[in-house]
Amino acid sequence: MARIVMKFGGTSMAGTERIRRVAQIVRRQAAPKPDGTRDEVVVVVSAMAGETDRLVNFAREAHALYDPAEYDVVVASGEQVTSGLLAMTLQSMGCKARSWLGWQLPVRTVEAHAKARVETIDADALLASLAEGSIAVIPGFQGLSHEGRITTMGRGGSDTSAVAVAAAVKADRCDIYTDVDGVYTTDPRIVARARKLKAVTYEEMLELASVGAKVLQTRSVGLAMKEQVRVQVLSSFTDEDSPAADDLPGTLIVSDSEMDAILERNDMERQHVTGIAHDKNEAKIILTRVPDEPGAVAEIFEPLAAASINVDMIIQNVGRDKGETDVTFTIPQTDLPRAQALLEDRRGAIGFNRIITDSHIAKISVVGVGMKSHAGVASTMFRSLSDRGINIQAISTSEIKVSVMIDEDETELAVRVLHTAYGLDAAEE
Ligand code: ASP
Ligand code: MG
């Protein structure tokens, strides 16, 4: 017997037909195994695709400055609908199932509405119900605040709900069913020879998730790493005779040591680079002729931090004459108008000359734990890009990632070139 959490995203839950397909997948997981034992199964669901957007719009139409607590009441409802529908559908197939809403468990959350964080999940009632052979269906995304109000966890938050539930019930695995069949070396729409990865480490997935490989909500990966939850990403768009989830057809997201064991079992060598991500949603700001003196950069970045604007790459150019320098950095494109206004306001205090902005940029990142122990990953990147005439505007690195900023028009070319350069292309059929 194993205890399995299964999570289904919005496209998997979009309509009664799809929900029926999901119910079949759940029933298969919950069916008796050859040795007569059964898995305990918890299912976490998203709202139907497009539903949360629709609800957000209603809230905005009702009141431009809506009360965040009431916003949560509205947007949490999409998951309530799908959890009830899935429980009913399972019952119609002869399975024992019931829904458990966020406030019923409860899923206790802290911090702001619309971006609540899970604090604790009371799993007692849930475990008792599982022990009686009932399938538990939990709406993702929603929780309960200390004040007894409904909260939601930020867009894409059902992934985090699923991982939190898996941690609370000490699940053997958390299967995240989605519309892709795993995590790829890069976006298969850009590189036809992208390969599905058997496994990635939490660290790698965190970098890949945050740099634009949109398979999982980044927070869910951080939580999985902290709680050591084994996650598998796999497709719900399969047919009856495709391999069972227990055969691990998707991509596993695991600890370093489990990764080593997987590589060994499959007689594989760790690649220096595991995957390549791209992100077109950043914008660049250049402040010219900033005084080259202590405190100058603090003046720039403090107000941005206070406004919760995330700065990513930063370069301070070599000083010009007269003790001045240019400072270049990137922020999310959606924050550009706010950042620009904030900086204009502080023009006097910061003492810059001009502010130049550019949204026509992309960030390309190569990621891999293998680069901890191998030199030359960055230089391969720079050489491969320059051979194709791609100009690098900024660079940032971490222990397992090298990112460059380039012209947005060159994104696809850069991704293809790097995919080949690091030997990631799948063998020709
Ligand atoms: N329904 C929510 C959203 O669309 C949460 C989720 O699906 O993960 O953001
Ligand atoms: Mg999602």
Image (cartoon, grey):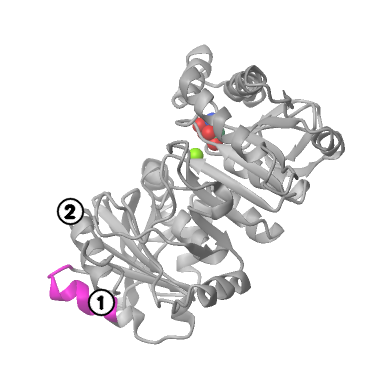
Query: Residue 33: percent from the left, percent from the top?
Result: 68, 45
Between residues 299 and 398, which one lies in front from this camera angle? Answer: 398
Q: Please say whether residue 390 is visible from this viewpoint.
A: yes
Task: Give amino acid for label 2.
Answer: Asp
Real-space Cα separation, disc 1 to disc 2, in angstroms: 18 Å
Q: Is residue 291 above or below residue 339?
A: below
Q: Is residue 385 magenta?
A: yes
- How many marks can you see? 2
The residue to which callout 2 is attached is 409
Quadrant in which the C terminus appears: bottom left
Segment tinted magenta in the rendering: 380-390
At 81% from the left and 35% from the top, the residue drawn is 126
Give left or right: position of 234 versus 36: left
Q: Is residue 384 magenta?
A: yes
For label 1, the SS is helix
The residue to which callout 1 is attached is 382
Q: Is residue 199 above or below residue 35?
A: below
